[in-house]
Amino acid sequence: MSHTSAARTGHLGSEERDEAWLEETLDHIAHLLPDQRPLEVFVHHNTLHGFEDRDFHLALRDAARIYGATTYQSEREFHAALTSGRIRRGDLEAAVDAYLEATGLGGKRRIAELISWRDLLLIELDFHAKKIAVASLPWAVSEGVLPRPRTDHMLWEACIQLARAIEEPPGEPARDEPNDHPLMQSLLIRLCAAYLDRGMAAWQMPKRELGFFGAATELLRHRSIFASVALKRAAELFERVAVERRSASQTVLFALDSLRVARAEASHVLERQCLQLAGWAGMFNRLEKNPTELPPELPSARLVDYLAVRLLLALAYSDDDIAAATLDAPRGDEVPTTSEGIMLQRALRLLFVLQHAGVSSGAAATLSRERCFELLAAVTRIDAFARAEIWQEAYERRYRDTIASALAQHRPQPVVETPVVQVITCIDDREESFRRHLEETDARVETFGAAGFFGVAMSYRGLDDGGFAPLCPVVLAPAHRVEERPIEAHGFAAIRARWRRRFAHLEKHSSASSRSLVRGSFFTFLLGIATAFPLLARILSPRLSHRVSLQLRRLFFQPPQTKLTVARDEHPESDQTLGFSVAEMTERVYVVLAGAGLKDRFAPLVILLGHGSTSANNPHRSAYECGACGGRRGGPNARSFAAMANDPKVRQELTGRGVRIPDATWFIGGEHDTTNEEIELFDLELVPPSHRAALAEAARLFDEARAKNAHERIRRFPFGSRRRTLAQALAHVEARSVNLAEARPEYNHATNASCIIGRRSRTRGLFLDRRSFLVSYDATIDPDAEHLTRQLGAVLPVVVGINLEYYFSTVDNERFGCGTKLPHNLTGLFAVMNGHGSDLRTGLWRQTVEIHEPMRLLVVVEASAAQLERAFSQLPLARGWLERAWFFLLRLDPQGGQIDRYDGKTLRPYDVRREPLAVVATSLDACCGERDFVTPKVIEAKR
Amino acid sequence: MSACLAVLLLSPLCAIALVLAALVVNRPFGEVTLQRITGAAMSLCVLASVGLLGLSVAARGHPMSADFGDLIRVGDYAFRLLFVVDALAVGWIFFSALILGVVARFSATYMYRESGAARFSVCFLIFAFGSFVLETSGNIDLLFVGWELVGLSSVLLVAFFWRRPMPVRRAMYVFIVYRICDMGLLAGVVMLHHYAHASDWQHAFGPGEWPLWTAHLESSQASLLGGLFLIAAIGKSAMFPVTMWLPRAMEGPTPSSALFYGAISVHTGVFLLLRMAPLLDESLLVRMCVLAVGAITAITASLTVRTQADAKNALAFATVGQVGIVFIEIALQLYVVALVHMLANVTLRTFQFLRAGSGLTDHLARRATLGEDAGHASVPRSSYLYMLAFHGFFVEALLHRVFLRPVARTARLLITLEDELERILFGERRPQ
């Protein structure tokens, strides 16, 4: 912030200079705010996106200070992991050594000629994991509880003497941050919600066309004799601002002056003001930077508007006579630290060190001040962050070793000679198990992983959709439109569409009128008691009631046969954005197939499965769907891709580019529901008769695999493990997807930990416990690393974003995540608050991270060193993350089991500590009866 | 009858005792056991309520009473455990048992792995017990007991997430409103004893059956009593001028919001008024007051709801708007209409609360079919009216001015006086 305050310190610059300063300051603050989109499209991203320019551990240190958050698991949790064997002693020692090497503290040098840094670190790690409350130390000492039994008392006394003699340098005085007035906060929240509302309230906020500052001014300048004193003062202020025609930024400057904020402090004050309700400020900032996400009726959303309203209200409420109630909630189990406690803690740490060094009490008493200082300085240097860093490294090292060892030992599986069906799924970690089960069910099945939009970036409108929605990663802007149209536009389809509209109107009116006065009375009176039936049915038997309503819908609203407008030449009437030209289709099919290493050797059936997720009563529903399709269902993309790949003209063009699809091959698009395991295949009526038998076989395969997949999944769920048979497992996951009370329809990306980019033969038959994103890539046919560059460029931002959002939401669920789902209150159709009114809750909810292990992503790439370096030389963004250690990268040699570590600059052989790799018959054997994580195992294919 | 009643009342009570006992001996139940206990208790309650409904139909709605003797007897006063199930009570018992059962099932899944599940269960069961006592009470003393239990458990569940400051602060707000308005009930209890020399409905209101009782009280006495009970009902049902506690109470987990504010708790005030129908019949003044309170609430709440941009606050105001209309119906002496309307409102709002998270999905589905017609937000005709509705018609500021501030000033004055007195009598206060 020094650069921003520099402009401000100069004595009252001109107005323009002040406004430039403000703009600069807001730019800086914007990096600190949460960047979550409106809920309709939930896209995982790095929670600490503003800190990506720093090394990971440094970023975590800074973020902890700025947000007052926790950025690592607690030392107690790490210690528990050590006790349970999740971290081995060796991992911890290796992490300590790596830390010493990185900080240059290694070597034989002994601190104060007593102890080596390595030993000191190990003692410190141990000491803090024990969690001796500082506040209870004086008591423990006075009661003689502590240093017993193995200490000689003289040494302990000597340590206390030493500790007392040393005065610690005074730390930074904690700033006293004033909190918002509760009434002001509640008013501000309601203002923001009313302004940003996308159709929740029956009345729009008036004058929204003036922007937030303008609309709020119009609303608040109204005077009323009944209003509270503070509101009257607010009315005066807003009136004055309106009369003087001040802009939002002028108002911010005016309010800062009126609040008597010192010039040097101004940046800091603004930062604090924004961070008080960071979620709301972040939403304004997000919409300002991405105006396409604004609803059509909203002209703008600007951070400076928000800040202007906020500061004026703060001014109005600053000397309110309603003293902020003194009712402060208990602050968790924080204990005030006393200086006596801190002194004793220091003594205790000295004691451990001296004990370790074998210093007698007599020698301790004569220890020189300098040596004591040196010792304590060393101890102070290893602060909580340094310790957490070491623990975290050890924690990740263990998982990295397990995966590296499994990949190094796993014998590459022979290529399936004559595959009966090839299935291409999304790279999603949730598809790992599904693919494994498919292959286990029939050894002649081959599976591939590709980003779930299958290269088809499009703006799509389904038969029953109101408008077009982009189906592609959010970084892309789709240039093509695809529409689902009934094959026969008249007759049944038209009648159906009409009736659907009628029903939707009815539903709309009933939901609106249940809240109104007169209509509401009749509505309540007539229909109120009748709602007892859906109430009872949906809560007592969610699955059955869902099936009944599904049957009814099928009976009345059976969708007609439809077709996608994929090929442009079939629709001469339309403009150039509808559909794709042959060349465009060829390019898309080529990228996906060749990228996955599929150039010849096609099975008679190639099935592409996009994915989506069904859940009930879930505002965060979009988060569970396909990230590569912008938080929407990926079925239409798979369907479009199949239509392209089946096009004879496309196939002809492809032959020229080295992808030879035989005539005997047919592509089918489909969709896999990751919650209830349903699989829907599209355009089956187009399948040639010669492929009907193969299709029936594939359908049977899917049925078996999805039941097994459900069975593997339910071991993680509460109540799930009691169910045994495959059919019961399937029924269980189905019930989850429709139950109104279900806070965990599925676990989404929880437990994600690695991303493996390479041929399936390297991972086929390996039980990876649904923790790996699997990307198909064949290094042997990609000499220029062209495909690798494209794959890494597309995949890394997505998977690293997912992984880091899970990391931060897990380590501090209240600050970085959105806490428990239970009190969530859907606001304005774009976010959730807690209960009556609170900051917008961003990030992930506790129910989805509760089984997650917070770790940085381990990316394994099967490629040659030259290919890897070449690819990364063209990907500055990903390379930056790698250099600053926001994820790890291991290189797996395509020719053998050699594994290297790549840190963005150099490639060094990775010392794989081999662990025995168990062999089991099936996946279900690998995890049966186990509720927790399962290490990689080899599934021995059926012969 | 007695058996059904005993099951209805004792099963939640036993469950509470069991859970608390386990906590006391420091061997708390696991979650699954806890849910089984709650589930079993609530299933028994539903069965008992069905039994009561059957018996009541068989008795053609005539009141059935069960007397379990005196709990305490002091001089002339006796606290009798007298329960009455009549046409008013039986429908309410049936619906509340059903809804409690459904919500118990809902929370079994919803609350899983939440810290404080035992606390939730206990509060839930206390609430169930309290509301059954209130509904089956045969005299005002028992009604008061049920009333207080319902209030206590509501407040505790508002503060369920006590580690955050806001739930605690808002629970305190609810608690204060409850306590102030409960004074009305307490005074009413005392005055009813004083005037009617009896506390049970039969003796206080004379022979007959609900709603055709006639109170043997003078009009002025009925007015005073009715007014006191109205104060109590206003508090519990979040009527004007204390409507604002209801949205504030949305801090608990969703099922408790559904149960308390959508359903049973907020309609308890209506039940009280219906129970006191004979008093209302006697006093035009009270009826006018009920009418006024109901009408003001219905109008302000239905306007305020239009400005609410979030699911739960909107539902709170929607609920309370309908309760206002039920108040009007009561004032017009349409007791049966009011009863049916209340039950309908209870069911509808419970369902709406439980699926409060579906708003976005519903909206997207609607937009998918209707396109641009989907949004039903309109620009209000008068921005002044919007402003009034947005600020809740300044009722809180008004309350603050005419009630809270004078009280606070008086209290401050008394403190100063006491300090001064202490100084005069004992010299300077020692620093603590």
Image (cartoon, coloured by chain):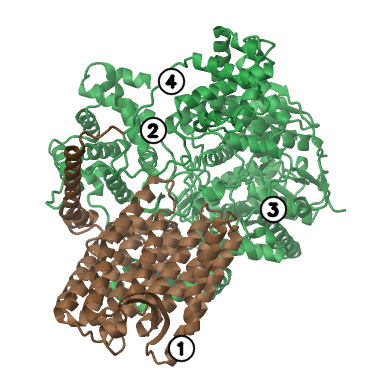
Chain colours: A green, B brown
Sequence order check, earlier mark of 3 and 2: 2
Residue A377, percent from left and from top: 54, 15
**Same chain letter for marks 4 and 1:** no
> What is the CA distance from the residue labelled 1 to the residue labelled 3?
56 Å
- Where residue A30 is drawn, which disc sits there? 2
> What is the CA distance from the residue labelled 3 to the residue labelled 2?
41 Å
Q: Amino acid at mark 2?
A: Ala
Q: Which residue is mark 4?
A: A171
SS type, badge 3: helix
Q: Disc 4 vs disc 3: which is toward the camera?
A: 4
Which residue is rendered at x = 43% and y = 49% of the image? B162
Which residue is rendered at x = 55% and y = 68% of the image? B39
Q: Amino acid at mark 1?
A: Leu
**Left or right side of A600 for A21:** left
Q: Which residue is mark 3?
A: A434
Residue A315, percent from left and from top: 22, 36
> What is the CA distance from the residue labelled 4 to the residue labelled 3?
54 Å
Q: On the image, which quarter does residue A81 sit in?
A: top right
Q: Which residue is mark 1?
A: B55
